[in-house]
Image (spheres, helix red, strand yellow):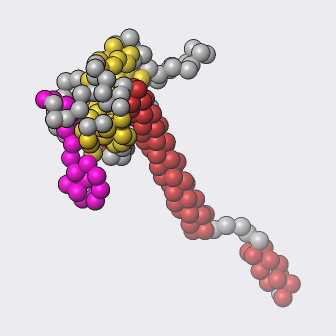
Amino acid sequence: MRKIRQLKYRRNRNAGFSLIELLLAMIVLAVGLLGAMIIILTAIVSNSRSRFDTAAVALAQSTMNRILVLSASAGVQQTQITDCNGTVHVMTTTPAPAPGAGAPLTDLANLGVSGNRIIDFTQPAVNGYQMMYTLCATGAADGLPTGIPQVYDVRWNVQSINATSQLILVAAKNATETGNGIQNQSRLFMLPMTLRAVRGN
């Protein structure tokens, strides 16, 4: 009888997982997969935001360079830039206090942040100091979709510091907010960065 009991004990001990143990293992696996999925989605959103913000800063820097090429004392305070659609944008760089001399500004303190003034995209655009610049989606030479062209709202402001120098402020913001098949991605975007530089004679 003792041998029979020992054989039954060994058989029960090696019987494998019970249904409850299997259920608990599946719950732990599901929680782990859900956490991994959240991390992947967060990475996709962050990558999309970084790509649009990087393009906006590069476009603002290009616009800034166009303005800085003209000296503060140049007779003609206009230059041009052409986007990938072939649209020629005329850029006025006349400093304030001339009428309509720049995009409206706001203080960062109004947004709860201490600091300098920045371009205010909530105000209407000023003609000559704003352009809707299109960046084309290129690079796919293998027949795959090239993506969605992005339109950026670029604005600038020129302020006189003294008789020989001016403060230039330029900012760009994605206006279409479409990409990766997602519409209305306002929640993915950071506050547009305002670039500053001083232009002299």
Most extreme residue toward the top is: 86
Number of numbered discs on residues = 0
At 31% across and 30% down in the image, what residue appears?
72
Query: Which image quarter holds the C terminus?
Result: top left
For residue 83, side relative to residue 167 (left or right): right
Indicate the quadrant where residue 152 lies. top left
Outermost residue to the left: 99
* Image x and y of residue 70, in percent: 36, 25
Residue depicted at 33% across the width and 13% down the height: 88
Q: Residue at x 13, y 29 (%)?
A: 99
Q: Give x and y (percent) for residue 148.
A: 42, 23
* Residue 17 visible in the snapshot: yes
Residue 105 part of the magenta-drawn span: yes
Up/down of 19 relative to 129, above or below: below
For residue 131, say whether it is visible.
Answer: no
**Is residue 141 rendered magenta in the image?**
no
Farthest residue in the bottom direction? 2
Q: Nearer the viewer, residue 58 or 23?
A: 58
**Residue at image location 19% in from the left, 38% down from the top:** 104
Residue 20 quadrant: bottom right
Q: Nearer the viewer, residue 11 or 115?
A: 115
Q: Along the line of sight, which residue is nearer the eye, 154 or 75? A: 75
Where the N terminus falls, by quadrant?
bottom right
Left or right: 66 in relation to 129: right
Q: Which residues are magenta?
A: 99-117
Coordinates of residue 193 in the picture (x, y in percent): 36, 43
Q: Position of residue 41 (x, y in %)?
A: 48, 46
Left or right: where does residue 105 sit relative to residue 168? Answer: left
